[in-house]
Image: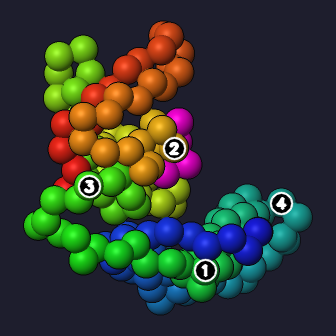
Amino acid sequence: MDTKSVYVTKDGLHELKSELEELSRIKRPEVLERVAQARSMGDLAENSEYTAAREELSLIDGRLEELGEIIKRANLIEENHKGGKKSLVQLGSVITLSVNGKKEQFSLVGEWEADPKAKKISHESPLGKALIGKSIGEKVEVEAPAGKVVYTIVSIN
């Protein structure tokens, strides 16, 4: 894993810590118990439950390591601008865009928090990169699979 900063909101950091807590305190001990029970059933070479439990344990351990690294490198996105208008798009901004006459609202977040379905876009995405540093009224052009899409920034919060 690289050593660059991971940008997250306070809520995003809380979610990461909650997942780490659940995996380490609940799921990992459950899987360890499954491994122990499967081991007690005898021949491990033909024991599919043992193999499945060991694979799940490996996945959990990998995710625990990944979460630990992410949390260690977390750089909290400043949210002191909540409730106030901002003049430039930055990490943590909530941006209202107009595209083809329709308005859509997006939150600009770090890559680990991005969730397009929830309208949370990464600052590393094509749209996120195009928006950073722009102001109300500016247009940004983004290459999409269907062609170029032009967005107009309506508001920044």
**Numbered tag placed on residue 87 in the rendering:** 3
Q: Which residues are magenta?
A: 122-126
Between label 1 and label 3, give the one nearer the viewer. 3
Q: Quadrant of residue 73?
A: bottom right
Q: Amino acid at mark 1?
A: Arg
Q: Amino acid at mark 4?
A: Glu
Q: Amino acid at mark 2?
A: Lys
Residue under the point 33% across and 54% down? 88
Label 4 to label 1: alpha-carbon separation: 42 Å
Quarter holding the N terminus? bottom right
**Numbered tag placed on residue 129 in the rendering:** 2
The residue indicated by pointer 1 is 73
Which comes sooner in the sequence, label 1 or label 2? 1
- Decide whether residue 114 is among the magenta residues: no
Between label 3 and label 4, give the one nearer the viewer. 3
Along the viewing direction, whichever of 84 and 60 lies nearer the viewer: 84
Which comes sooner in the sequence, label 4 or label 1? 4
Main secondary structure type of the part rendered in magenta: loop
